[in-house]
Image (cartoon, grey):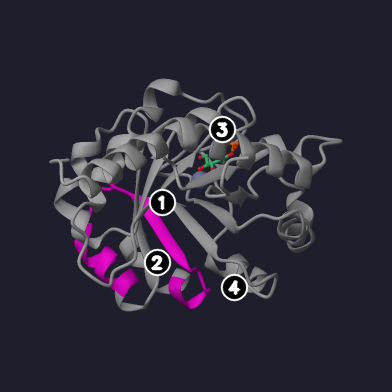
């Protein structure tokens, strides 16, 4: 049995939006480690969802972390409101046409986790200038804007190398995490684990009619953990053994 490592962050984008509190509680009761909140402004992506006011009203549900995924063109203009709403992490897109660093610094100054997300076509190298300010790298494996899309395997190839952005992390700073977001389900979970993803954002597959959310979440987590043991985890274990033996990494 693989050691439990993978965390699930449930996306509520495709839940019954007429009762967000009930659906969020259902996700937590089913074992979700975090809640993934997809904020869309109808400009950065061709869809509009909800904002900080809704998140603030939802915050009383559960104690688990809230992860805001901002698919908006002006994250700097609204970031204070998402901090005030109680988001534990705030991730916005590196493709926005405004300064990135001040917003990352503001999130961290508020004691929250700061993240940058990448559209499928955006290379990982665009994050290099910000790597010291990142706690989360969110690899999108669908075009942002809608749930229920198919997993883009070619975009997933960024997951393993994304961990390099957290190398030689300043002492005392928690390790960074790679979140994979879009089309994650029982068919793509193993690959996500093989590539070392720490957090799997899981949405529509949980909200299908008749699905046992808790069972589906356990299956996805187990597949990802198994993938990790046979993939990135084996690589890390081998590297650790070489270091133990005094061999160069
Ligand atoms: C898409 C969102 C994702 C999506 C995940 O723009 O960022 O979080 O809701 O849902 P599924 O798992 O259905 O792709
Ligand atoms: Zn998302």
Judging from the image, what secondary structure is the residue with disc 2 in?
helix
| Mark sitting earlier along the chain (1/2) | 1
- Is residue 58 highlighted in magenta? no
Q: Where is residue 65 in the image (x, y as percent from the top left)?
A: 55, 66
For label 1, the crowd category at 10 Å Cα-Cα, with few meaning under 14, some 14 to 19 and many 20 or more, is: many
Say if 55 sits above or below 180 in the image: below
**Residue at image mark 2:** 78
Judging from the image, what secondary structure is the residue with disc 1 in?
loop
The part of the image, by quadrant, that contains residue 203 is top right
Query: On the rendered image, what quadrant is the C terminus found in?
Result: top left
Magenta span covers which residues? 83-108
Q: Position of residue 11 (x, y in %)?
A: 61, 48
Tell me the tag on residue 28: none
Going by the picture, which residue comes out furthest to the right? 210
Q: Name the mark nearer the viewer: 4 or 2.
A: 4
Real-space CA distance between mark 3 and mark 2, rounded to the nearest whole angstrom:
33 Å
Q: Confirm whether residue 166 shows in the render.
A: yes
Q: Name the mark nearer the viewer: 1 or 4.
A: 4
Residue situated in front as seen by the camera: 158 or 129? 158
Say if 60 sits above or below 100 in the image: below
| Mark sitting earlier along the chain (3/1) | 1
- Is residue 89 highlighted in magenta? yes
Q: Name the mark nearer the viewer: 3 or 2.
A: 3
In the image, taking residue 212 as reference, residue 241 lies left or right, namely left
Q: Which residue is drawn at 23% across and 41% down?
A: 242
Residue situated in front as seen by the camera: 183 or 197? 197
**Residue at image mark 4:** 56
Real-space CA distance between mark 3 and mark 1, rounded to the nearest whole angstrom:
27 Å
**Residue at image mark 3:** 189
Q: Which residue is drawn at 74% across and 63% down?
A: 21
């Amino acid at each position: 049995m693989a050691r439990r490592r993978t965390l699930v962050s449930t996306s509520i984008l495709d839940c019954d939006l007429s009762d967000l509190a009930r659906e969020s509680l259902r996700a937590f009761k089913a074992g979700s480690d975090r809640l993934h909140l997809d904020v869309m402004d109808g400009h950065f992506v061709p869809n509009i969802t909800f904002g900080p006011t809704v998140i603030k009203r939802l915050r009383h549900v559960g104690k688990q972390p809230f992860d805001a995924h901002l698919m908006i063109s002006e994250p700097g203009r609204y970031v204070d409101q998402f901090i005030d709403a109680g988001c534990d992490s705030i991730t916005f897109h590196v493709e926005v046409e405004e300064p990135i660093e001040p917003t990352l610094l503001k999130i961290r100054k508020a004691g929250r986790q700061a993240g940058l997300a990448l559209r499928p076509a955006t290379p990982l190298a665009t994050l290099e200038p910000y790597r010291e300010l990142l706690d989360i790298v969110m690899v999108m494996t669908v075009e942002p804007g809608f749930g229920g899309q198919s997993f883009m395997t070619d975009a997933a190839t960024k997951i393993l190398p994304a961990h390099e952005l957290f190398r030689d992390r300043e002492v005392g700073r928690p390790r960074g995490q790679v979140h994979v977001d879009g089309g994650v389900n029982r068919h793509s979970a193993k690959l996500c684990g093989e590539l070392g993803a720490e957090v799997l954002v899981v949405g529509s597959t949980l909200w299908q009619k008749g699905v046992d959310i808790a069972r589906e979440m356990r299956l996805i987590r187990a597949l990802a953990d198994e993938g990790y043991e046979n993939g990135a985890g084996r690589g890390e274990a081998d590297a650790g053994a070489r270091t133990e033996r005094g061999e160069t990494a």
